[in-house]
Amino acid sequence: MSFPSRPNILWYCTDQQRFDTIGALGNPQAKTPTMDRLVNDGVTFEHTYCQSPICTPSRSSFMTGLYPSKLHNTRNGNDTFPEGTPLISKLIADQGYDCGLIGKFHLQSAGYRAEPRVENDGFSTWKFSHAPRDDWEPGTHDYADWVKEQGHDLNALRETADRVPAELHQTTWATTRAIEFISEERGETPWMLNVNVYDPHPPFIPPKSYASKFRAEDMPGPAFQPSDIEAQNALGDADFQTHSRDPSEFNGKQAQADYYAMIALIDDQLARLLEFLEESGQAENTVVIFTSDHGEMLGDHGLLYKGCRFYEGLVRVPLIFKLPGQFKAGEKTVTPVELLDLSATLLDIAGAEIPKYHQGFSLLPHLIGKKPLHDPVRPFVRSEYFDALAPKFTQGNGTFATMHRRGKYKLVIYHSLGVGELFDLESDPNEHNNLWLTHDYQAIKNELILESFNAHINLTTDVGSERIAPM
């Protein structure tokens, strides 16, 4: 069976959802029957790494196919988006796709203004929302306008005991807008829809009807050891949104319960969307992709939220592909991949040529069986943090750091601090035993430092314009 020409693409991206939040992937506390079905019906890359643990550099990276430092877009709160590199949505639109954006975009500063669109972004439909507040200018934030049209005030709702009810939630709005997009009559024109819900991004305030389904006492608690506080204090000048504390001080189990409640709402709304896709007769010719831009510490190592760290909960995200009759069903692989590889795969699925500058590798041959699913995709995976968060959000001072994982070893270097971490992820999956100074691991550490340095030079150096002469 040959791969269909230009299938529809439903690309669903959550915000700040860590890799281990899906029931079918081993989390008994998660209530995710819809995500479970995607796992059982599709292909799951269980070791998928974002290219930065912060929203804007991560999203900019997978929307262009470049590492954040190569793109020159490493910060949240940036004034402008770099010119010259087209978004993959534009390249897909150039293949004749009708492309839509619903929800968060965040390639530029969007916290204190309505985010400007990128010129020639390729989206014919643009239903934008960012933080679910009610202080946006009318006409600039479709979700806030939608809530107002129904006679409600978002800020007032958030202050009530019921919080924002599920029927008025940003996740529900995104599903409603997605169904409207899929319902449009296009004839033979294929579509690509990028749905970006804001949850489970903090603050952890699920609707009360969902919060009541998850009890703190049923949660396992964060991956924490008392030694974590000293270890994190040693990295005290590395930007992070919170100090390391014993999770009992911030009720880490309650944070887990609320986080899983937010994901349960996402799961229910995803079910509503996929059911409509089936009812519309388009499911058989639609690639469904589920992922997130980066993870969440959720109390691990005594930390909440995000910042300059590269622990698995923060840099590993879900990545699931489904296409009935074409992609393998119920397959999982631990082969490490990057969100850059998702980016290349989207282009490949749409029949677009992957640009020479693109730094991802298409996973499509693995999905359709032309290459073994468990074959290595790349020799290592990489993530970056270069002055990504504003000082007002952190205790740091413009940290520069990189992560380099090869095989079972993960190397992290805080370049601006002169310290690092080395973990054996096979024997220490929760990353409590830092081998950076351990005598028996100095050879592998030095080998990975050199490899990481060479990767940085090779992957991020901007050599300028194209050479047109031999001299």
Image: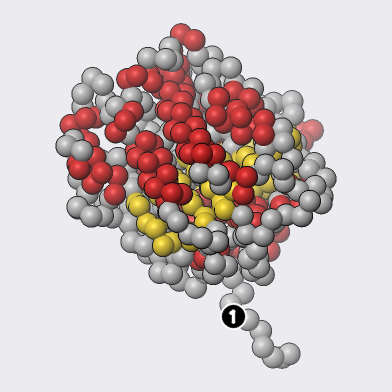
Q: Position of residue 275 (x, y in %)?
A: 51, 35
Q: How many marks?
A: 1
Q: Which residue: 41% across, 40% down?
A: 175
Q: Which residue: 44% across, 19% down?
A: 257
| Left or right, 327 with reference to 167 | right
Colouring scheme applied when the structure was drawn: secondary structure
Q: Which residue: 19% across, 41% down?
A: 148
Q: Which residue: 55% across, 61% down?
A: 188
Name the residue beneath numbered marker 1.
465
Q: Position of residue 265 (x, y in %)?
A: 42, 28
Amino acid type indicated by mark 1: Ser
For numbered disc 1, what is the local secondary structure?
loop
Q: Quadrant of residue 27?
A: top right
Q: Position of residue 337 (x, y in %)?
A: 68, 46
- Rendered view: 421 above or below 391: above
| Left or right, 369 with reference to 251 | right
**Residue 229 visible in the shown view:** no
- Rendered view: 368 above or below 91: above
258 vs 212, nearest the viewer: 212
Q: Position of residue 341 (x, y in %)?
A: 65, 52
Dot 1, crowdedness within 10 Å: few (<14), some or many (≥20)?
A: few
Q: Quadrant of the C terminus?
A: bottom right
**Residue 370 visible in the shown view:** yes
Which residue is situated farthest in the top direction here? 217
| Left or right, 127 with reference to 334 | left
